[in-house]
Amino acid sequence: MRWMESEQIHATAVIGSDVELEADVKIGAYSVVEGPARIGRGTIVESHACISGPIMMGANNFVGHGAVLGKSPQHRGYRGEETWLRIGDNNVFREHVTVHRGTPEGGRETWIGANNMFMVGSHVGHDAWIGDGCTLVNGALVAGHVRLHDGCILSGHSAVQQRVRVGRLAMLGGLGSTTKDVPPFVLQQGYNCVSGLNVVGLKRAGFSHETIGAIRSCFRIFYKEGRSLTSALDAIEADWGTFPEVREWVDFVRESKLGINPARGDARVHRTF
């Protein structure tokens, strides 16, 4: 192995003249970093990865073998305009992950927070917004303009359609897909089917027994009592609105533009008003 610059950058790596590397950044063999780019301290880039600017990456990220971050958006209307990819701290991008920059239509920026894990072959499309602590399991696909809130999980080979929002601590099961918004704290499986609450995730996140009980009641009122959307939300607010997590759930549903999927065995499809 041939290294240069205090044994941090492999001699076969290609680093553009407009790339800024902070302290202790390590670049592996045959990787390409083309600017404008700024890579935060302590970041590790394994071999054969490609990082393309404009990109701003925070500290202590890990970029695995063959990952491609910051290439131009896969969008027919893109005409080479300057757009960006911004990445926070402590993220893991495993082998062959792809993340694309934004488009002028979507605000010019794809944004990724901190402490996320992107497993092998997962993809984040243009103009997506990823919060903190999310997990994308192998092959998970996030289309353009999607918003993933903190702590959500996309299981293996799941897919999220463009402009969909996935709420905090929600989980999309393996091979599942969604064309509608997924409220916080729920478990969704298959195609557009809510199957229950992500109780395991709530417990791991430290939710109290009382809070989980309130969310269970919220779920029952919304999905199991046959109410209209407005009636269900009003009842939830009246009975359980003192819990911040319930307020979060209600606000998420009220703000939906794509609608919310029905529960398993429920023929109704809630739509926004």
Image (spheres, rainbow, N blue to C red):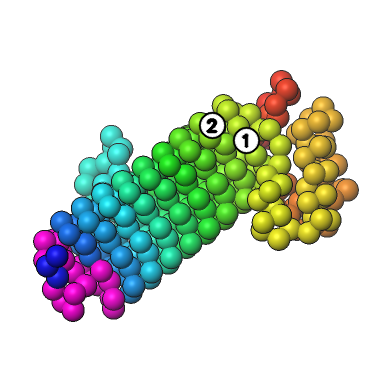
* Mark 1, secondary structure of its residue: strand
Magenta stretch prevailing secondary structure: loop
Q: Which residues are magenta?
A: 4-26
Q: What residue type is disc 2 on?
A: Gly
Tell me whether circle 2 and circle 1 mark residues in contact (CB < 8 Å). Answer: yes
Q: What residue type is disc 1 on?
A: Gln
Question: Is residue 19 on the magenta stretch?
Answer: yes
Circle 1 sits on which residue? Answer: 188
Which quadrant of the figure has residue 62?
A: bottom left
Residue 226 in sight: yes
Label annotation for residue 176: 2
118 up-or-down from 262: above or below: below
Q: Is residue 256 left or right of residue 1?
A: right
* Mark 2, secondary structure of its residue: loop
Q: Residue at x 82, y 50 (%)?
A: 214
Q: Residue at x 56, y 26 (%)?
A: 191
Which quadrant of the figure has residue 63?
A: bottom left
For the C terminus, the quadrant is top right
Q: Earlier in the sequence, mark 2 or mark 1?
A: 2
Q: Residue at x 36, y 42 (%)?
A: 121
Callout 1: 10 Å neighbours few (<14), some, many (20+)?
Answer: many
Residue 194 on image: x %, y %: 66, 33
Residue 107 on image: x %, y %: 39, 52
